[in-house]
Amino acid sequence: MQQYSPQQLKTRKAVVVFLKNNGAPLILYVEESETLYNEIKQLITSANEASPKLVEKSCKGPVKKFAVLDTMIAGVAIQEEPYV
């Protein structure tokens, strides 16, 4: 395994979205991770099973576009990770 010096490592934040009936979470990379985190958190609290709304977001990582019904979101987190 290659070792990297602290000067080579950078830190990025990813928004982790947990969906109902899905084992693996979605990892979303965006410019403003805190903003997206708070937005999804608000969607979770205001979701209404009687009238679900489609949520669509653009991302900059492997997942380029993300669309899901607000009633399908089970949770959200921010993950900080090192990268070179």
Image (tube, rainbow, N blue to C red):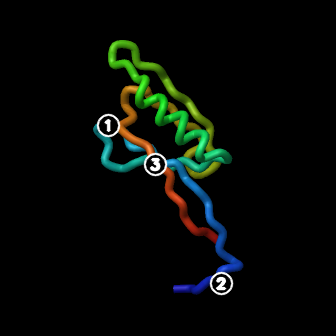
Q: Which mark is residue 77?
A: 3
Q: Nearer the viewer, residue 78 or 3?
A: 78
Q: Amino acid at mark 1?
A: Lys
Residue drawn where x is 43% and y is 23% of the image: 46
| Residue matched to label 2 | 5
Q: Point out the frontmost of discs 2 and 3.
A: 3
Q: Amino acid at mark 2?
A: Ser
Q: Which mark is residue 20?
A: 1
Q: Amino acid at mark 3?
A: Ala
| Residue 14, horizontal then vertical, whole percent | 55, 53
Q: Badge 3 local density, few (<14 within 10 Å), some, or many (20+)?
A: some
Q: Which mark is residue 55?
A: none
23 lies left or right of 16: left
Residue drawn where x is 34% and y is 13% of the image: 50
Residue drawn where x is 41% and y is 28% of the image: 45
Query: Which residue sits furthest left?
Result: 21
Hey, which quadrant is residue 69 in on the image?
Answer: top left
Hey, which quadrant is residue 18 in on the image?
Answer: top left
Q: Badge 1 local density, few (<14 within 10 Å), some, or many (20+)?
A: few
Q: CA distance from mark 1 to mark 3?
A: 15 Å
Q: Is residue 32 above or below residue 81?
A: above
| Residue 39, horizontal then vertical, whole percent | 54, 34
Residue drawn where x is 39% and y is 13% of the image: 51
Q: CA distance from mark 2 to mark 3?
A: 28 Å
